[in-house]
Each structure stands twice: as C-alpha cells, then as structure tokens.
Image (cartoon, helix red, strand yellow):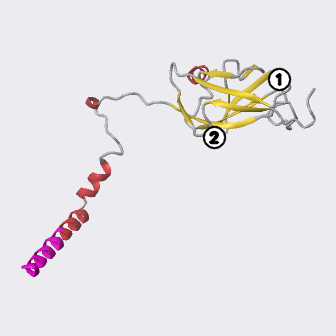
Amino acid sequence: TIPADAAPGEIVFTQPPLQSTSYYKIASGEYITFGWNFTDLYVTPTSLTLSAVCDNGNTYPIGPTDGVIPGNARSVVWYPYGYQTGNPTVPLAQASYTLHIWGDGGPSAAATPGYLDANSDLEFALYTPQPYTPLASGWMCVGCGGALAGVVAHPASVALVTTLLIVFLSGFTTLRRVWD
C-alpha cells in the first residue's frame, strides 16, 4: 500500500551529470549511456519510454528497442550512429536535445503519490565530427589568420601605427631635452 503522504516517484539521473550539457559524437563505435535511480517509487512501472526531443522539434526514440525498456531498468545504452544509418529520412541534427522519460502513465500524466512521474531534466547535445584534412592537402584555418591580415594590410592601420610612432618618438625627444 502507498502511504497517503507519499511523494510522486521520481527519476534522479546519475549519468551523464546534470550540472552541464554533455556533448556526444554521432560516429561509429560511439555509444551514450543514460543512467538513473528511482526515489519515492512504490509502484514499479511495467515499462519506461525514453525519447530525445531536439531543439528543431523532432523526437527520436532512445535505446535499442524504439525507446521502450523494462520498468525496472536503471540505465539504457543508445547508439546514435546506428539510429542515424538506420533512419536516413529523419537524421539526427547537430543540436541540443532534452531526454524525456516516463512510465505507464505517459508523458503528461498527473503526478500521483508512489507512481513514477515523467522527467525531462537531462539535456545533452549531438555533433558530427568533420573528416580529417592534412595540412599538406591545403587545409586552412578559417578563423585563424584571415582577420589579422585584413587589419594589418589596411591603409588606415598602417597610417595609425605610423602616426603613433611619430608622436611617441617626438615626445621622447622633447622629454630628453628637458631632463638634460
């Protein structure tokens, strides 16, 4: 029996940490493990449903079984690359996601004492790594040298540096005469 003053059951995420956004690669051999514990749970759900809701509005199932796992599970391992290759019509975006997890009551069920309440506290991000390009094949750092070269070569920059140099040297010469 569930005590009358019992709180709704909750999920507390243990992996990855909630303190900061975790970034994961969509690449071959890269798996993501989501782990959690239950608190105040008197009635174990028969199943848990997990989905990743993207900033772009798309929702993706998490885990090996289209997002539905046993209700007593404490973790799930997701292979985003496998999902990506198996679902080319709805690819995973390079964006932020919110993990939604709920029990038998569904994603919008009212909180009930002792029963699992839905959770959407965990945020993570996915990215696709760029292929390696060797320097010898012409790789250029887009943000490294282009901006400085434009400033140095600009006529106003040259004029400003020259003017400051003349003012400094003239002032130094004048001060030297005063000290002598």
Does 160 sit above or below residue 67?
Answer: below
Tell me the residue that label 1 is attached to: 44
Which secondary structure is most common in the magenta stretch? helix
Choose top left, top right, bottom left or bottom right for residue 88.
top right
| Image quadrant where one finds the C terminus | bottom left
Query: Please, what secondary structure does the residue beneath circle 1 have?
Result: loop
In the image: residue 31, left or right of residue 99? left
Query: Please, what secondary structure does the residue beneath circle 2 have?
Result: loop
| Image quadrant where one finds the N terminus | top right
Residue lying farthest bottom? Answer: 178
Choose top left, top right, bottom left or bottom right for residue 111.
top right
Mark 1 neighbour class, 10 Å CA radius: few under 14, some 14 to 19, many 20 or more: some
Picture coordinates of residue 52 (x, y %)?
67, 32
Picture coordinates of residue 178 (x, y %)?
10, 81
Does 59 sit above or below residue 77?
Answer: below
Choose top left, top right, bottom left or bottom right for residue 21.
top right
Give the residue type that dot 1 points to.
Answer: Thr
Q: Give the residue at x 64% y 26%.
A: 34
Q: Are marks 1 and 2 in contact (CB under 8 Å)?
A: no
* Residue nearest the observer in this picture, 86 or 41: 41
* Residue nearest the observer in this picture, 144 or 11: 11
In the image: residue 111, left or right of residue 97? right
Q: Which mark is residue 71?
A: none
Q: Give the residue at x 82% y 37%.
A: 108
Picture coordinates of residue 136 (x, y %)?
25, 29
The region drawn magenta spans 165-180
Q: Give the residue at x 46% y 30%.
A: 129
